[in-house]
Amino acid sequence: MSTSFANRLAEALARYGPLCVGLDPHPGLLADWGLPDDASGLRTFAERVLDAAAGRCAAVKPQAAFFERHGADGVRVLEEVLLGCRDRGLLSVLDAKRGDIGSTMTAYAEAYLADGAPLAADSVTLSPYLGYGSLRPAIDLARATGRGVWVLGLTSNPEGASVQQVGSPTVAARVVEQVAVDNAGMSPFGDVGLVVGATLADPPSALGLDLRAAAAPVLAPGVGAQGASGADLLRLFAGLTDRILVPVSRAILAAGPGERALAEAVTTWSDGLRADLATG
């Protein structure tokens, strides 16, 4: 890719605002839509969501697990989803949370970040909890191919604090410091992003995280069904709202299965989040 992920993300955020539509075809939702819990149901579900999202939001975040549970047929649909994102001009955030060491991490990187790979996405989520350095094959390949990664920092699930907020400096703070090294000198921000939940009780700065110094885009889950709001985004990420990507899944997908209703939900959330963050 000739343009860096950071530049493509910045352009998408400026054009469409911060909304990232989550693509989570769990069995209950497929049933609510009157679709079978198999590859054909996944395909119909995904096509409707992608059509509703196209031209109305910055990105789509398919959750790999909901496709992988269907084996080879489900992974094939995920390949189609990633291709469908490219065809529709939607940035893809593949939510796989991969993390391993050595040749295994290299293989994960090649699966999701290499040119020509069937599962190649614009960006992928990574777990740094085998040590930040273990992510190097993915970070390096993403940079070489114009793609990005999102490293788990402070996640939106309550259990995360028992690992991420331990120590002085905390584990999360150390991750952020290493992201800052990788993003040094990049503009408007780097291609190594951070996942920081919008459900935090305190701003990241109060927890020892300097997100501005990290020069990282932020993927901020937790808005919608998990209870966070646009006001929470402003409170937690003041001064950084031009680099926040906000995934919303259940609150939008509940509007289905009709494509018009889905498109209206995407537009409503997109406009609402853009207005919420306009003063930040």
Image (spheres, rainbow, N blue to C red):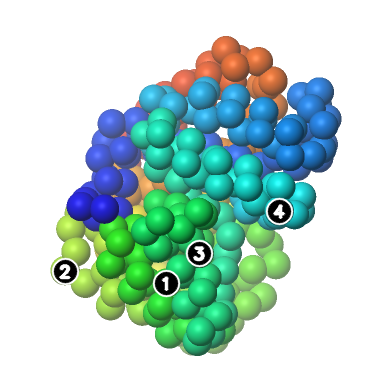
Q: Residues within 10 Å of mark 1 (few under 14, many from 20)?
A: many
**Image vertical order of residue 181 relative to residue 92, above or below:** below
Circle 3 — which element?
Answer: helix
Q: Are marks 3 and 2 in contact (CB under 8 Å)?
A: no
Name the residue type under label 3. Ala
Circle 4 — which element?
Answer: helix
| Residue with the mark numbered 2 | 185
Q: Label 1 vs label 4: CA separation?
A: 24 Å
Q: Residues within 10 Å of mark 2 (few under 14, many from 20)?
A: few
Query: Residue 111's mark?
Result: 3
| Residue under the point 41% across and 31% down | 88
| Residue with the mark numbered 1 | 138
Q: Label 4 vs label 2: CA separation?
A: 41 Å
Name the residue type under label 4. Ala
| Residue under the point 40% across and 79% down | 136
**Image location (x, y in percent) of residue 239:** 29, 50
* Relative to 16, 248 lies left or right: right
